[in-house]
Image (cartoon, rainbow, N blue to C red):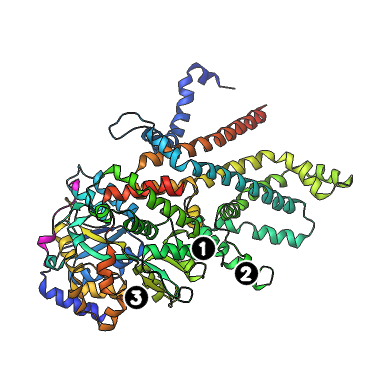
């Protein structure tokens, strides 16, 4: 309820709030909105200052495949991330072997502290045809040297992104699962439900929102990483970020790079819309 | 250290020493080894000869992108009276553009070492006249590295190379054109060999319509790509050679020698330059038009292009080919050190097959046509 004083002079009530959020708003405007608007505008401006769609057409013609590749790799990564993080978070919540739960809890967070570029370099040495993984498999007799193949393609990307993002999503998910009322799970267990069934039918529906938030934030991260595709992927198609860097490095061509950026914005904008809608719904539900 | 002192004394006698607190900002494109070169070797040497001077090195990143960053830095300051870069180290393509746009000053005549600059690339940078504005820091060259255990009779020309690759699928690896200059250079060499306009590609004049005549050459390259392995980056090619995944691939010669010296690469690997040749490029020292410490900058470059420093720093420590007249540098090296530079590729072959990069417009057009016709 607004106080009587504030309702007589609405501005006085709003002003302190405005002053408080002003620095944050200014930072967002200067560091985010202005560069974003500039890059969108430059994607449509030619050398003489006129409007053109030539950059967009070049981007589609030369890098259309890369855009599709990016979307597919992002989706595949998100799927792998969901499966693995649900499995880990589920075991952390429902696991019955205390030492295994402790060990997993200790281990799963490590990749959070490894920078993407290090993950990229590690993947490059690990997944190459004569890399560490295949060498180990061959030495242990599990693989025939002739069948060894390099995983440094979309599979390497998906694995690296998943490896990096699984801990983050698991962290959110395990927290959410821990705060779910355990009595529902215990009731189901008493009725004879297996742990897997408890996870899928009882826990998961209750933490769906958290999982979605984790995946949306992962998508934005995946869309923005440059080092991993640069190090893992050879040739084309590759992630859009690589091609934006290529455009700037070899052609000094910011226009086409910006046009490519537009596709990134569109994809992340869809995710951002879903995210905002969800937080608003949650907010409204909370307010009721 | 002792050597640095001797060098320091020699130059101290020649140069007058102003005693004042000055900072010389050296901004260099290229890999981290470029910054290391200034920070670990050249900077301290210059400081020891010029008391009160501090050399501050800043790297702007590898490849043409690094030069582009320096260009943008200078271009943004164009309205200012004084710019915050005293010495720049840039690639050829950007040097041409910077000269054209009046961002650099002509300084070579003010240096005592100017007369030692004999390379053609010091006068002409991918079709732009840069005489006087630049002095080459070093020359680097792209060559094909191969594993003699797997390739007993290495191909000596691009045509032979294409045949060899077809007979040995997957054994030739290069990094395409998006993974670094070694791959880009390989593609330029391919165009020199198969486009019938090798001379024009390098020296101009530029004619956008000529790209239409490249279709057979590019179709051949597309065919070649189906039997080649595409590696991730310049280092990726060396890694793949080292792991035995490929038997042959284009590399920068200096990077190759450095990796061998560091024990990161199989020392049995060898180098060759197939006919008609592969491109190489210098990096240039430049002085921005409104550098705050222009005089000091010229003095710094004079030191950097002296035969002693070229021998010790460029050849001995970093395995680059000298930027100034090689004969002047030779006197400062042992016969063994000089020989090591040309173990696999003789000076004659280098002179004949060490070509320049394409003229700037062709540079761009070849890459874009490749993207259109070969990569897609």
Query: Circle 2 is placed at which residue position?
Result: A145
Determine the CA span between mark 1 and mark 2: 17 Å
Q: Quadrant of residue A30?
A: top left
Mark 3 is surrounded, within 10 Å at the Cα level, by few (under 14), some (14 to 19) or many (20 or more) other residues, namely some
**Sequence order check, earlier mark of 3 and 1:** 1
Query: Circle 1 is placed at which residue position?
Result: B169
Residue B1 visible, this orientation? yes
- In the rendered structure, the residue with mark 2 lies on which chain? A
Q: In percent of the image, x 60 and y 50: which residue is there?
A: A168
The answer to if B105 sits in the magenta stretch is yes
Q: Quadrant of residue B294?
A: bottom left
Q: Are marks 1 and 2 in contact (CB under 8 Å)?
A: no
The answer to if B333 sits in the magenta stretch is no
- Give the foreground label among 1 and 2: 1
Where in the figure is residue A32, as x and y percent of width and height? 43, 38
Residue B344, numbered label: 3
User: Helix or strand or loop: what does disc 3 sit on?
Assistant: loop
**Relative side of A139 to B144, left or right:** right
Secondary structure character of the magenta stretch overall: loop
Where in the figure is residue A81, as x and y percent of width and height? 64, 49
Q: In percent of the image, x 46 and y 23: which residue is there?
A: A12
């Amino acid at each position: 309820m607004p106080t009587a004083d504030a309702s007589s002079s609405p501005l006085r009530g709003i002003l302190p709030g405005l002053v408080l959020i002003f620095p944050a708003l200014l930072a967002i405007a200067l560091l985010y909105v202005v560069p974003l608007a500039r890059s969108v505008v430059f994607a449509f401006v030619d050398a003489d200052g006129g409007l053109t769609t030539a950059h967009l057409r070049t981007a589609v013609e030369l890098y259309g495949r890369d855009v599709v590749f990016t979307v597919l790799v992002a989706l595949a990564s998100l799927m792998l991330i969901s499966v693995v993080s649900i499995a880990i978070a589920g075991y952390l919540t429902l696991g019955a072997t205390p030492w295994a739960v402790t060990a997993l809890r200790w281990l799963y967070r490590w990749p959070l502290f490894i920078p993407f570029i290090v993950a990229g370099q590690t993947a490059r040495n690990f997944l190459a045809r004569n890399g560490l993984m295949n060498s180990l498999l061959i030495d242990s007799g599990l693989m025939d040297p002739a069948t060894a193949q390099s995983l440094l393609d979309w599979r390497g990307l998906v694995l690296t992104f998943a490896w990096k993002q699984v801990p983050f999503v698991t962290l959110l998910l395990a927290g959410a699962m821990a705060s779910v009322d355990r009595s529902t799970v215990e009731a189901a267990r008493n009725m004879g439900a297996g742990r897997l069934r408890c996870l899928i039918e009882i826990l998961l529906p209750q933490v769906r929102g958290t999982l979605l938030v984790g995946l949306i934030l992962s998508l934005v991260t995946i869309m923005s990483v440059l080092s991993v595709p640069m190090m893992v992927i050879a040739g084309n198609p590759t992630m859009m970020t690589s091609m934006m860097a290529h455009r700037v490095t070899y052609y000094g061509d910011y226009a086409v790079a910006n046009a490519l950026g537009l596709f990134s914005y569109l994809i992340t904008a869809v995710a951002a819309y879903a995210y905002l809608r969800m937080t608003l719904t949650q907010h409204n539900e909370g307010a009721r | 250290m002792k050597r640095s002192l001797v060098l320091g004394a020699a130059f101290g006698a020649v140069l007058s020493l102003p005693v004042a607190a000055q900072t010389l900002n050296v901004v260099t494109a290229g890999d981290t080894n470029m910054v290391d070169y200034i920070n670990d070797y050249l900077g301290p040497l210059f400081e020891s000869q010029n008391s009160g001077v501090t050399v501050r090195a800043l790297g702007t990143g590898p490849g043409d992108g690094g030069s582009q960053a320096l260009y943008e830095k200078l271009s943004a300051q164009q309205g200012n009276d004084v710019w915050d870069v005293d010495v720049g180290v840039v690639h050829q393509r950007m040097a041409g553009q910077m000269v054209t746009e009046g961002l650099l000053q002509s300084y070579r005549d003010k240096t005592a070492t100017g007369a030692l600059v004999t390379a053609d690339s010091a006068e002409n940078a991918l079709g732009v006249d840069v005489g006087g504005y630049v002095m080459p820091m070093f020359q680097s060259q792209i060559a094909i590295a191969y594993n003699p255990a797997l390739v007993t009779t290495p191909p000596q020309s691009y045509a032979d190379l294409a045949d060899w690759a077809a007979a040995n699928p997957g054994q030739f690896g290069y990094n395409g054109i998006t993974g670094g200059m070694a791959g880009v250079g390989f593609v330029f060499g391919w165009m020199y060999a198969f486009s019938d306009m090798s001379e024009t590609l390098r020296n101009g004049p530029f004619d956008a319509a000529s790209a239409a005549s490249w279709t057979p050459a590019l179709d051949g390259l597309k065919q070649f790509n189906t039997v080649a392995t595409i590696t991730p980056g310049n280092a990726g090619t060396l890694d793949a050679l080292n792991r035995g995944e490929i038997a042959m691939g284009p590399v920068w010669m200096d990077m190759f020698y450095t990796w061998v010296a560091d024990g990161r690469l199989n020392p049995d690997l060898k180098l060759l330059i197939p006919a008609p040749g592969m491109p190489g490029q210098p990096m240039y020292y430049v002085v921005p038009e409104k550098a705050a410490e222009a005089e000091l900058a010229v003095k710094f470059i004079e030191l950097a292009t002296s035969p002693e420093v070229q021998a010790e720093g460029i050849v001995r420590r970093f395995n680059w080919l000298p930027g100034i007249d090689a004969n002047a540098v030779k006197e400062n090296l042992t016969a063994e050190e000089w020989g090591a530079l040309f173990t696999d590729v003789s000076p004659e072959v280098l002179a004949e097959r060490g070509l320049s990069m394409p003229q700037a417009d062709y540079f761009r057009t070849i890459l874009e046509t490749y993207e259109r016709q070969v990569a897609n």
